[in-house]
């Protein structure tokens, strides 16, 4: 009988340990933003179970191009807008800057960015985690900048090339590559609003070679 009692106690201890291992304890008080599984699914070691958000500590993370990073400072005032909030302008302050730059995650610019953390004056309730936003600071580029289709930009040793169409011929224009949203890219160089640029067929194109215009693809 005594042996059975010890065996039952050991079984109970193992069951309690298994139950403790099955409990998820949040490292902070927050809101569950996403479940990464369904009841009954097998969870592997290290696999995320939930995404937890602390609404009180939300901030905007901006990617500052390396050419602009020297003009951004902690304490600088900025404005934030979001497509999800048309017409609203949210003022905020740069609270932190990353200590090191990192490669930009796109195949166009081959440049680097510095992460900036921005806290909004109106508090974290103004935005939701994961929203795409635009951030504007008080500094502006000293030379005019235009938006062109990203397909028109050819990376060239940290800078870029855009082929402008003049009188049916392609003209090579060296540009500095700025921000991109995927579809369009900011460039600075000898381009004007309304210029037509080559989007496809750039491979092997030579300066002054004849090009055919399929439609209007001007910058701006």
Image (cartoon, grey):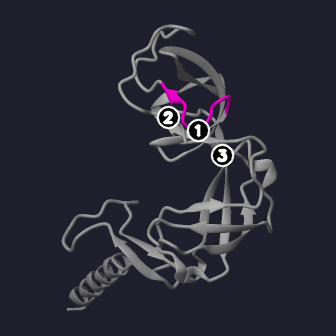
Do residues under tags 2 and 1 come within 8 Å of each other at their CB atoms? yes
Say which residue label 2 marks: 218
Dividing the image into 4 quarters, which one contains the C terminus? Answer: top right
Q: Nearer the viewer, residue 132 or 57?
A: 132
Residue 186 picture quarter: top right
Residue 119 rendering spot, x and y as whole percentages:
66, 73
Residue 187 rendering spot, x and y as whole percentages:
62, 37
Q: Crowdedness of circle 3 by 10 Å Cα count: few (<14), some, many (20+)?
A: many
Say which residue label 3 marks: 113
Residue 185 rendering spot, x and y as whole percentages:
54, 40
User: At 68% from the left edge and 28% from the top edge, which residue is drawn?
Assistant: 190
| Gap in angstroms between the C-alphas marked 3 and 1 | 27 Å
Per the image, label 3 sits on a secondary structure element best described as strand
Q: How many marks?
A: 3
Q: Nearer the viewer, residue 214 or 25?
A: 214
Mark number displayed over residue 193 = 1
Q: Is residue 51 magenta?
A: no
Residue 18 picture quarter: bottom left
| Gap in angstroms between the C-alphas marked 2 and 1 | 7 Å
User: Which callout, 3 or 1, points at the residue further toward the start of the chain?
Assistant: 3
| Gap in angstroms between the C-alphas marked 3 and 2 | 27 Å
**Range of magenta residues:** 189-197
Residue 216 rendering spot, x and y as whole percentages:
42, 32
Per the image, label 1 sits on a secondary structure element best described as loop
Is 86 on the left-hand or right-hand side of 37? right
Is 51 on the left-hand or right-hand side of 7? right
């Amino acid at each position: 009988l005594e042996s059975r009692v010890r065996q039952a106690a050991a079984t109970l201890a193992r069951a309690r340990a298994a139950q403790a291992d099955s409990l998820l304890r949040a490292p902070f008080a927050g809101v569950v933003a996403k479940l990464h599984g369904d009841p009954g699914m097998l969870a592997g070691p290290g696999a995320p179970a939930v995404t937890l958000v602390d609404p009180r500590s939300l901030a905007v993370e901006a990617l500052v191009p390396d050419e602009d990073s020297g003009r951004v400072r902690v304490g600088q005032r900025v404005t934030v807008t979001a497509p999800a909030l048309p017409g609203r302008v949210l003022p905020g302050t740069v609270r932190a800057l990353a200590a090191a730059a990192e490669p930009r995650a796109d195949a166009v610019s081959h440049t680097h960015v510095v992460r900036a953390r921005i806290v909004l004056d109106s508090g974290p309730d103004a935005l939701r985690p994961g929203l795409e936003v635009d951030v504007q600071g008080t500094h502006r580029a000293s030379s005019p900048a235009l938006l062109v289709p990203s397909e028109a930009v050819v990376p060239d040793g940290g800078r870029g090339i855009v082929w402008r169409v003049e009188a049916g011929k392609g003209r090579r224009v060296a540009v500095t590559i700025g921000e991109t949203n995927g579809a369009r890219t900011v460039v600075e160089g000898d381009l004007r609003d309304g210029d037509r640029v080559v989007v496809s067929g750039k491979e092997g194109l030579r300066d002054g070679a004849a090009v055919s215009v399929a439609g209007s693809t001007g910058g701006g």
